[in-house]
Image (cartoon, helix red, strand yellow):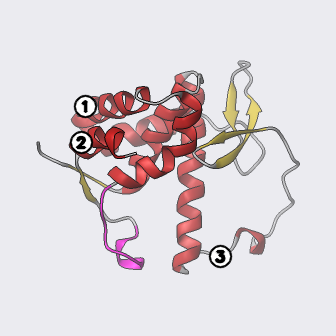
Amino acid sequence: MTPVRVNRAPVLTLWAAVVAERLGHPPETALSLASAVAGTAARAKARRLGIAEDDAARSGAPVPPRSSVELLGHAVPVLTAADGSLRAADGEGRPSPHEPALRYVERAFGKRLEEVHAAMRALAQSLPPEELNRLGFRLYEAFRPEVREGVSGWGAKGELRIERIRDAAGAR
């Protein structure tokens, strides 16, 4: 099977959305939450690589505490959108829309999106929701594209092998 050339961030975004849906969130909420998880992971990696400053070093007023949703080991701050749906909170204290995340994964996967999405949904269905959420990031690490270590691998595309997504169910 031909691998999909993609960087890790859209893979994590799509996977986190699949997990969020398995936890019972509607697709729009799942994409908003997933985008927040992928953004948090990217910022943490950038800090580890020394290419971004620590969040505490940024200026600006702190965002007041709010409720959160646990997704793949991340506590995602959430707000209620104008339509009454739950969304991840953006850095400005507003509900984060799902459309940019949807366009992002559509661009990243192109015509292979449904194939990858189906494999991820099958993996998600192989576990009870709470266990999936607990093990989900480790599962992602088992199938994510391999890229060079360090700064040279930052944002680089790797090969996502769909069979590794399918095999992750048996590897847990």
Q: Is residue 150 magenta?
A: yes
Residue corresponding to mark 3? 53
**Which label sits on residue 97?**
none
Residue in view at x 53 percent, y 26 percent:
21
Judge the density around disc 3: few (<14), some (14-19), many (≥20) Cα neighbours within 10 Å: few
Residue 112 location in percent, x, y? 23, 36
Amino acid type, label 1:
Glu
Residue in view at x 72 percent, y 51 percent:
91
Residue corresponding to mark 2? 162
| Mark in the foreground, 3 or 1 | 1
Residue corresponding to mark 1? 115
Judge the density around disc 1: few (<14), some (14-19), many (≥20) Cα neighbours within 10 Å: few
Quadrant, the N terminus:
top left
Q: Is residue 52 magenta?
A: no
Q: Which residues are magenta?
A: 145-154
Quadrant, the C terminus:
top left
Give the SS element for disc 3: loop
Between the residue at mark 1 and the residue at mark 2, the CA separation in whole angstroms equals 8 Å
Residue in view at x 46 percent, y 32 percent:
18
Front in this rendered view, residue 77 or 92: 77
Q: Earlier in the sequence, mark 1 or mark 2?
A: 1
Residue in view at x 31 percent, y 67 percent:
147
Residue 157, compared with residue 168, is above or below; it is below
